[in-house]
Image: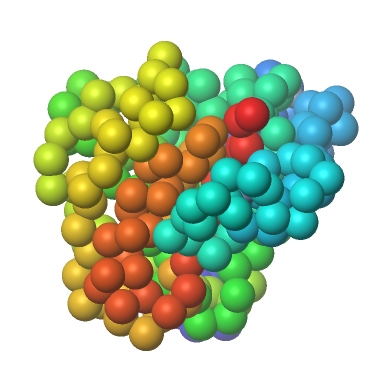
Amino acid sequence: MRAADLARAVAGALLDLVYPPRCAACGEPAPDGGTFCGICAEAVDPVPAGCGRCGLPGPDAICGGCRRSAPAFDAVRAGGLFGGPLAEAIHALKYGGRPALARPLGRWLAEVVPPAAGALVVSVPLARGRRIERGYDQAALLAGAYARGAPSRPARGRAALARTRETRAQVGLSREERARNVAGAFAATGAVKGRDVVLLDDVVTTGATADAASLALRRAGARSIVVVALARAE
Ligand SMILES: [Zn+2]
Ligand SMILES: [Zn+2]
């Protein structure tokens, strides 16, 4: 064990003594330092089989939408379906002023959807206005915890992807409006050139934001792009 890893492990053990691990959804004690308590862990629904490209649950190997217009990313993987305890934990992380939840949730995601060896973990950057309002970028925090929690220890591309303009919140917009809202809103740096990128976000819904961000990564030379999210919303 490297000195830095040892220091982190000792710090983590001390933190657990002072603040015993609590379920990220309901706040009850979580056994064995887990992210969720036993009841909430059972209530997280796995993502059903679906489109090999966008992950949309359904019987088709590639869905109609992806056949008509393939997204810029190669695949989507999510920790679970949006709902129940997973939705509660994400809500607390995003809107409840609980940035510390990024650590257990990122670690959980690295167990459920581990990155490929040699991957570069990049997060979808939050719009500046929302970052100032919230005080933190939850996807960036998640990406850090995800990279640290994965046994393959992937690299973290902190400044590899940026927003080039402000966008409206996607909530309440139609599929077409969402795509238009985020089109061309991202730029990536040469750090992604030739890399297998894991693009991390909290929730994937239509994939419009992930697609726009992936297009920027692709243009900057990313070799492959897998979108990884805590939850898949339908
Ligand atoms: Zn719980
Ligand atoms: Zn699809």
**Image position, residue 206 (x, y; %):** 51, 36
Number of disc labels? 0
**In front of the other: 98 or 201:** 201
User: 218 or 121, which is in the foreground?
Assistant: 218
Can the viewer see residue 104 in this picture?
A: no
**Is residue 54 placed above or below 149 in the rendered structure?**
above
Q: Residue 46 at what x, y percent from top left?
A: 79, 41
Whether 221 is drawn above or below 203: the answer is below
Splitting the image into 4 quarters, where does residue 57 fall?
Answer: top right
Q: Residue at x 27, y 70 (%)?
A: 219
Which quadrant of the view contains residue 134? Answer: top left
Q: Residue furthest front?
A: 68
Residue 178 location, quadrant: top left
In the visual, does 125 lie left or right of 176? left
Residue at 48% across, 60% down: 73
Q: Is residue 194 visible to the viewer in this orientation of the structure?
A: yes
Horizontal and vertical percent for residue 148? 51, 64
Q: For this view, does 21 lie left or right of residue 5?
A: right
Please name whichever residue, 191 or 8, is drawn nearer the observer in this view of the structure: 191
Residue placed most toward the observer, 94 or 171: 171
- Whole-percent x and y of residue 121? 43, 65
